[in-house]
Image (cartoon, helix red, strand yellow):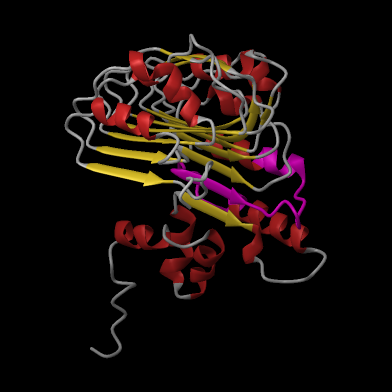
């Protein structure tokens, strides 16, 4: 019994689950274990390709990495993919754009459900990625999307998650509109430090929305997401100054943070959009201005149990805190946080 190879005796499905927890370089290395393992790695449906895992200071690291992936894809069984993830380090490595395009097209042709491209100096995605009938999750941390979105040829019927990081999309307001209109099943949208002309965010089926803006993001004029469950807006400048958020009756968790702006327009409508919110966090150096504009017209939050107010001085803005408490009759937890005082009491 001491010489029984219990792991190799496990069924293929279970071994594939184990291999899916490793990065692809480690998966391929299992082929030295036995003849059975030589074919197991070729059936793995999850590819995680990590350039920094090639631990070497050789100037040919990109070439070695590229050769490894090319040989991997050529020797892999012609089965469908579940996940394709590519991780580079843009400050140190520069993989050929042509190669990255070829790898992405391989993933699309093999019906990958999840594609993630992170840290690559890659400026133009192939248009085929925007018409994939199998793609369910797309995560991108690259400088630009490319011409496929601008042309409006987006048809991703199964896409449920779209996370974009650090992408330049400004200069054409149609980019975001084309993306959203071409993703009828989208439920989770995250725009993290993307330079984008937001203007209107409209997606009837969206459930989770997160926008962390760059400084030059255009103002948000309207958000129409009636089925939203969670909302996170962390913005700089006057992006939300005149925003009009349409009512979102299912919205439960909200974070609104605005820093560096001037004031809010008297006609803006933000706080009134989530009457059934349960957890609410308001922060930023001009949040007091939003409360002064909207406090009298915001609804009574009967479902609100957790309220977090940041950057409000308890001496100068006590009336705003009291006003929010008056609109929150069933509040269970109140958190106040102010790192600096904006006034000095006479008896200090």
Side (left or right) of 295 relative to 144:
left
Residue farthest top in this picture: 267
Q: Nearer the viewer, residue 266 or 205?
A: 266
Measuring from the top left, give residue 62's x and y in whole percent: 75, 58
Which quarter of the figure is the N terminus placed in? bottom left
Residue farthest left in this picture: 330
Above-or-below relation of 22 to 103: below
- Residue at image position (27%, 20%) is 275
Side (left or right) of 122 relative to 205:
right
Measuring from the top left, give residue 158's x and y in whole percent: 41, 25
Residue 254, can we see it?
yes
Give the magenta part as a residue range.
73-102
Above-or-below relation of 267 to 112: above
Side (left or right) of 120 relative to 287:
right
Above-or-below relation of 307 to 295: below
Image quadrant where residue 208 sits: top left
Image quadrant where residue 318 sits: top left
């Amino acid at each position: 019994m001491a010489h029984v190879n219990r792991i190799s005796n496990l069924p293929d499905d279970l071994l594939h689950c184990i291999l899916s927890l490793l990065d692809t370089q480690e998966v391929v290395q299992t082929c030295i274990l036995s003849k059975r393992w030589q074919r197991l790695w070729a059936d793995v449906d999850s590819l995680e390709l990590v350039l920094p895992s090639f631990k070497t200071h050789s100037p040919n690291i990109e070439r070695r990495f590229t050769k490894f992936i090319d040989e991997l894809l050529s020797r892999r069984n012609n089965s469908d993919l579940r996940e394709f993830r590519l991780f580079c380090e843009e400050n140190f490595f520069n993989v050929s754009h042509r190669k990255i395009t070829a790898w992405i097209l391989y993933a699309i042709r093999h019906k990958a459900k999840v594609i993630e491209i992170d840290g690559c100096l890659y400026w133009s995605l192939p248009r085929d990625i925007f018409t994939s009938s199998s793609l369910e999750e797309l995560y991108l941390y690259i400088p630009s999307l490319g011409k496929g979105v601008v042309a409006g040829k987006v048809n991703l019927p199964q896409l449920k998650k779209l996370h974009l990081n650090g992408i330049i999309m400004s200069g054409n307001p149609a980019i975001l509109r084309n993306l959203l209109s071409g993703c009828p099943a989208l439920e989770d949208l995250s725009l993290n430090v993307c330079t984008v002309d937001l203007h209107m965010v409209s997606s009837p089926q969206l459930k989770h929305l997160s926008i962390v803006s760059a400084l030059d993001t255009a103002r948000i004029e309207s958000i129409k997401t009636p089925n939203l469950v969670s909302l996170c807006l962390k913005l700089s400048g006057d992006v939300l100054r005149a925003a009009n958020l349409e009512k979102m009756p299912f919205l439960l968790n909200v974070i609104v943070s605005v820093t560096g702006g001037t004031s809010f327009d008297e006609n803006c409508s933000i706080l009134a959009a989530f009457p059934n919110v349960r957890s609410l966090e308001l922060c930023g150096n001009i949040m007091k201005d939003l409360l002064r504009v909207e406090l009298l017209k915001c609804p009574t939050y009967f479902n609100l149990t957790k309220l977090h107010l940041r950057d409000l001085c308890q001496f100068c803005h006590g009336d705003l805190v009291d006003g929010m408490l008056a609109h929150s009759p069933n509040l269970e937890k109140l958190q106040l946080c102010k790192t600096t005082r904006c006034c000095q009491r006479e008896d200090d």
